[in-house]
Image: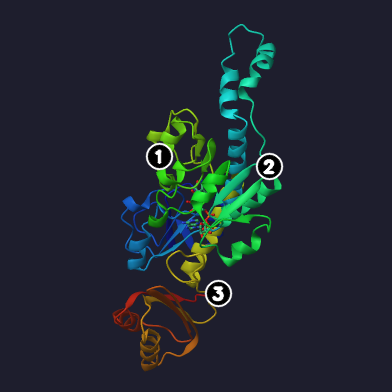
Amino acid sequence: MYKIKTFNKIAKEGLTQLGENIRVDKGEDYDGVILRSYNLHEEKLSDNCKVVVRAGAGVNNVPVDSCTEKGIVVMNTPGANANAVKELVIASLIMTARNLDKATDWVQTLKDKNVDVAKTVEKEKSNFKGNELQGKRVGVIGLGAIGVLVANALYELGMEVYGYDPYLSIEHAWSINKNINRSYDIERIFQRCDFVTIHVPLLESTKNLVNEQVLRNAKDGIKVLNLARGGLVDEDAILKAVEDGSVSYYVTDIPNEKVLGKENVICIPHLGASTVESEANCAVMAGKEIRDFLENGNIKNSVNFPECDLGAMVSNARICIIHKNVPNMVGQISSLLASNDVNIANMINKSRGENAYTMIDVDNDVNDYIEKTLKEVEGVTSVRILKNDK
Ligand SMILES: NC(=O)C1=CN([C@@H]2O[C@H](COP(=O)(O)OP(=O)(O)OC[C@H]3O[C@@H](n4cnc5c(N)ncnc54)[C@H](O)[C@@H]3O)[C@@H](O)[C@H]2O)C=CC1
Ligand SMILES: O=C(O)CCC(=O)C(=O)O
């Protein structure tokens, strides 16, 4: 029986994917983790932890580098919450274009003022006159699972869309509407567009992607939407630009003390992925991924180890080895098995950067001595022996 710890509330649809061999446990000794936005950097992970699954996209709340060193596989659920974010981006765009935040706040102030509400509304509504999205220019920074959906949807709403993603994957390129304009320069996007929306991961290289330099030359009155991560936008620079009016609205889904209470800064309490549908999608994908890894050793949607899949276990045992991506690892492993009379029925070896993963199906039993000797091979990070009980 495997134990997993959930550091956030995970939708029940996901937990039912775990099957009979995996249970959620509140203790400190666990084989895996499923979490959403919980900050795992502050946790000491269980010595038995083999896998961390982020039910969502961003993994900046997970200590990926130290997990990699320890041979802990980190996975996420790409695209599972993308539609939820896309819809909130559309809502945010319309909110800023039509001044909905100010207008709805104002109309509430008429309560108990003893005024004719209908008449006052008609008299004052011109204060909140907005613009239509149709025909306006929007820049989409990052064309991954979310950015592509956003770009395509905004094009369908009649906007002129400019997409920027120097690392665009082939898979996402196939999904982009051919009428989306390709942009090669983030500053140019800010110079040309009426709206910009950001959909990139927070990495060392994307920190303060939107900075003073980018904002200095931006189109006057531009509206900037950040439903990705706080650190992507230099907050001092954007607040200054909002204050002097050169940025007419800043929308953030990742608020903090600094951005609260400012005029023309709309703060959303990290609701991008908070829909019933998205929470279920992420949880189901996370539940399937952690189960397939714990029970079969297969790695899917990992951010630190290679994709590797040998299907469901049919042989007597499966040996799963995380090791350095250096010459002669597979040679040493297979010689060691041969010298212990273990026959390899099937195997796969995949690498990613400095690390590699080898899965070997064997017909024999794998005893403790073999496991211990495999662990002693230089360059081996971890060894798991999965036994087929069926
Ligand atoms: N507000 C919320 O609740 C949510 C926020 N997010 C945030 O949105 C981010 C994006 O999510 P997905 O689209 O699902 O991820 P994704 O991994 O599918 O797409 C990210 C895209 O950003 C691109 N990119 C990376 N560096 C870039 C750079 N310097 N300039 C331009 N593009 C760059 C990548 O090539 C990739 O295409 C996540 O990392 C997360 O931080 C994601 C889901 C929900
Ligand atoms: O799980 C959540 O509510 C946050 C989603 C998110 O930010 C992400 O998937 O990166």
Q: Name the residue under label 2.
A: 135
The label on residue 237 is 1
Furthest residue to the top? 114
Q: In which quarter of the image is the C terminus?
A: bottom right
| Rendering coords of residue 30 (x, y %) | 38, 59
* Distance between mark 3 and mark 1 Cα atoms: 52 Å
The kind of secondary structure element at disc 1 is helix
Residue drawn 49% across the image and 35% down it: 246
Corner quadrant of residue 91: top right
Q: How many labels does the image show?
A: 3
Pick whichever of labels 3 and 1 is earlier in the sequence.
Answer: 1
Amino acid, disc 2 = Gly
Q: In the image, is residue 307 above or below residue 270?
A: below
Residue drawn 46% across the image and 33% down it: 242
Q: Name the residue under label 3.
A: 312
Residue drawn 44% across the image and 55% down it: 59
Q: Contact (CB < 8 A) between labels 2 and 1?
A: no
Q: In the image, is residue 341 above or below residue 154?
A: below
